[in-house]
Every structure is written in C-alpha cells, then in structure tokens.
Image (spheres, rainbow, N blue to C red):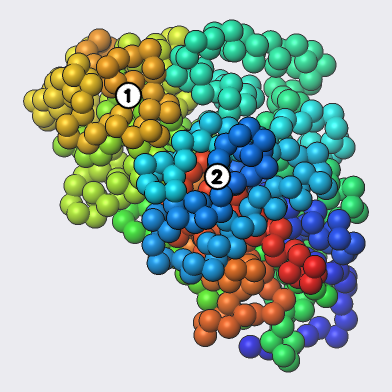
Amino acid sequence: MQSELPPIWDEEVDVLVVGSGAGSMVAAATAAQQGATTLVIEKTSMYGGTSATCGGGIWIPASHSAKAQDQEDSPEEALEYLTHLIGNEVPRVKLESYVNNASKMAEHVESISGLRFNAIPYTDYHAELPGGKMGYRSHETNTLDARELPAEDFQTLRPTHPSAALFGFIPWTTLEAAPMVTRAPGWLTTMIKIIWRYASDIPQRLRSRRSRFLVFGNAIIGHLKLALNKYNGKLWLNAPLNELYRDESGRVVGAVIELNSQKLNIKVNNGVILGAGGFERNQEMRDQYLPGETQAEWSGGMEGNTGDTINIAAKIGAATDLMEHAWWTPVVKVDSEDRGRPLFYERALPGNIIVDQNGERYTNEARSYDVVGKAMIDASLSGRPTIHSWIIFDRKFRMNYPMGPMLPLIPDWLHPASVRRMFKRARSLTELANQINVEPETLEQTVSKFNEFARTGNDIDFHRGDAAYDQYYGDHNVSPNPNLAVIEKAPYYAVPVYPGEIGTKGGLATDEFARALDTDGDVIDGLYVIGNNSASVMGSAYPGAGSTLGPAMTFGYVAALDALNV
C-alpha cells in the first residue's frame, strides 16, 4: 500500500521512535549511540509512558547479574519455561529471539548508560513449571538522583504511580518494599530509613512533595534519557503521530506528526520504531476486542495509551494479533485518581478473601495478578457476578497490612475523603453483607469456611499458599500458612475490586526482529513495533515480574540494530 509522498520534507532523521517508554528509550539511545540521527516523539506533555509510572521490574533470563550471583540459568531453560506457559500462541523463533537477546540488551544498555541491572530473588510466577526459577530472572535497576538530570528533564518525567510508593508519594526500592509489606524482620527500621531519606532532602521538601530519589520506572527512564542526551538524540513532547508514508516499493519512509499543533512531514532513512503503548484507555477498542465487561477507567495504564499507532499502522496494511489479551490485574478505584490501583501483592497477605456478589470465593486470591484478574473475567463470562467483586478483611488485617491506598496503622478518619468513600465498614459480617447487598448467611458461611482453612493451613478449595509465588508476599510470621489468617475481628471491611490491567497485550504483528508484518505475513520494510504496541511475545501468559518491560527493552534494542544493519 503506497502513500503519496509530500513534495517537501520538514525534517529528516535516520530513526524515528514513537513513544517514550522504556522500550522506546532503549531503541533511541541505541540508535543514537550508533551514530544515527534519532528523534523520539511523545504525544503527551510528559515522557516515560506507563514505564515511568510502574514498579520497574525487568524479566531477563540468564543475565550477567544472575551469573555473578552464582545463579544457574540458561536461555534453553527459559525457553522451556516459556514454551510450557505460552504453547503455540507465539512463533518459537520469536521466543528464541527474546531469550537469546534479553541478556545482550542488558549488557549493551549498561555499556551506553548509567543504568544497572540487579537480579533479585523474586520467584517466577509459575516457578513450579519445567524451566521455572525461584528467583533471579526478575531484575531491579539502580536508583537515580534527579539532580543528575537537566531541570526540564526532571520536570517533564512522568511521576511514579501512587500505588508504587510508600504513602503514595515516598519512593522505595523493590527490596525495601517486600519486607515492609510482609512485616519481615527489620521492616520498621527499613520504613524509618525510607522516611528519613525522603524528609532529609530539605531543599526539595521546601519546593515540592515529589522526591528526587528516583526508583523503579522513573529511574529507568531517567538513566535512558541521560544516555539519549549524551548521544545527541532528540525528544519532542506534545508531538503525536498522525500518519505513516510508504514509497512505491512498500517501505515506510516517513511520517506526519504534529508538534504543538503544527503538522510536520518527517523523512526517515532507516526505520520508524513504534513503541507508543497499547489501547487500554480507548473504550471503543476495549469494547471491540477485550472480553467481558471492561472499562478504561479501571486500567492502570497511562491515559495516553489509546491505540492511535495501532490504527495508523493498520491503515497501511499492518496486521494485528492477540487483541483479546491484556496484562490483567484486579484493581481498586479511588474516585480522585485517573487510573485504577492494581492489587499486586495485597491479596496474598493473610486475612483477606475475594468474593463475588453472592458472597462466595471463586479463585486463589494469592496467585499472580494476571491470573486473578483473568479469573474475574472468566467467571463473569460463565455467569457468576464477579464484576465487580469485593475484597473482605477485618480489623487485624487493616492494622497490619496495606489494602491499596488504605494504609496500616493510620486510622480510617485520617485517610483522604476519596479513600474513605472507597470502602465499606461494619460492626459485624451481617451488617457488612447488608451494606454490599450480599446474602448475610452466605457471606458468614464463606468466611467461616475460610477461617477453618486458615487454622489448618490448607485451603482445600483453591490451594492458596501452595505455590512458591503465593508465599512470596505472604507473612512468614503467620503459621501454618503465611497466606492464610482468620477473619474474625470487628470492624469488618469491604472494598470493591474490578478486573483492570496494566496495559493491553494485543497489537501489531511482528517477527523475531521486531519488524512489522502485513496481513499476508510479509515484512513491512522500515517499520518496527515494540512493547505493548506489538502483539506480546508472552502471548496470553505472564512468566514473572518484568514481563512487560523485559520484552519492550529487548526488542527495542533488536529493532534499533536491525534498522541500522548492525
């Protein structure tokens, strides 16, 4: 499909990268480091995308960091694991490309930037499967002092999501967060250290609540922006993509973009790399592709992810795949926030259950968030009233553990009004059941049965606490099962839970080099797609923490090198 080329080009670059998340920034920094004139365009007023707001885990099999810690792993074991999870949903050659290039990406990024990858003992989500590991495939990265960034770069870096920070605004690392959430030994000392680190930056506290101690996705994007600056790459904000140009041979050779509402024709010599996220904030596309009841307001994804580039590429013949899939997670909704708050770990803590609108459990609450989120949808499609569901807990849980924005040790009345509006509270289970329109006898029976499971340590119905991942966020001070505790201390609480996600998985079809494919399965020369813009290499599965950023960054690296014939 040929596009009519403009008579005059307003700008010429070697590589045009659309979107500014982690995958896009790896691609751009790699291309710029190779000497290519590189331009990143971001349609919103802040850069970093959903990557900047997230917990920053990166799933990299057989990394140099894991090897340095004497952890045995190999691309072959990772491929075995992925094959058991994904089956035939994704061509094997794409899986091979990922497991063989992920560690190369990490070493390359370390060679061109200040970003460092540290393999951590975070278990794979399905470690019991062949090839699964009890840890050291998920990586956290080093932090960054925002004073290393130019002032404008810090001001326009999209902030961390409140759900990924202590009290919603104080940054912590992955290894700091886990013991605090689960009340592991030393958690109080850790909390004091974190609060002191934040409070002691007096000059910044006088200016803003935002911390200059950058962690998670903020640190990743910050380090990569410094690398892009170092190699003279450009980043334009408020610059959405409008159209792609193909020449008479079918190669993508340019693009129409807007810059502050002015249309510009950009000539691209080597390749356009699309990395602009999924379509989770586009309600029309959700209704068209995603299963069951689904709302954009439940999404944990960034508001700019509306699928524009998927539709633009489809207009020039690009194919799509896996459009019915997403990175599912149960979420709670605070009405003052523009996104859902994912319940990544709270469900695994002992002393809570998720029930449907009949007051009955229907899943293992402690399983990985994608499994629980999808279980809500699947149960609803089969006729159960699970959208929305309720997460139920008591005073003991409330005072010991977080539940979304509800913080332990902080009285209910000290929480913001928007948080107080989110939950129901009652002096008895009967009263709570009446508040949430559930049959009291059913809810009482459900809680009574669960309490018996907690006392014996054996969840006969759903096997909560049996899997290694379940126990990762369990409280190991609780026995006989760190994921189970009785619910019996008034007052009782109920919070509505929705099937949200942290991004869609379906997108443009690609090959093992991240090259876009057309509807006949042929390569569209000059067009590459990465991250949630592309159909995920993970298929419908979620292997472990960082399964979004890992492929995005890996195929960003692969795409840049292929575009430049390196």
Residue placed at 60% from the left, 43% from the top?
Answer: 58
Secondary element at image label 2: loop
Mark found first going from the N terminus, 2 or 1: 2
x 73%, y 38%: residue:
116
Count of all numbered marks drawn on residues in the image: 2
Examine the image and state in which quarter residue 132 appears. Answer: top left
Looking at the picture, tell me which residue is in the foreground, 336 or 298: 298
- The kind of residue tagged 2 is Asp
Instruction: Give the residue pinned by disc 1.
Output: 483
Q: Amino acid at mark 1?
A: Asn
Q: Nearer the viewer, residue 45 or 35?
A: 35
Q: Which residue is mark 2?
A: 73
Residue drawn at x 72%, y 83% as measured from the top left: 251
Image location of residue 293, percent across then percent down: 32, 53
Q: Residue furthest left?
A: 441
Q: Quadrant of the C terminus?
A: bottom right
- Which residue corresponds to the image point at 14% horizontal and 24% vertical from the top-left? 449
Q: Is residue 21 left or right of residue 79?
A: right
Q: Secondary structure at mark 1?
A: loop
Q: Is residue 324 above or below residue 204?
A: below
Q: Residue furthest bottom?
A: 248
Q: Quadrant of the N terminus?
A: bottom right
Q: Is residue 239 left or right of residue 353?
A: right
- Residue 221, how many percent across, how many down? 72, 43
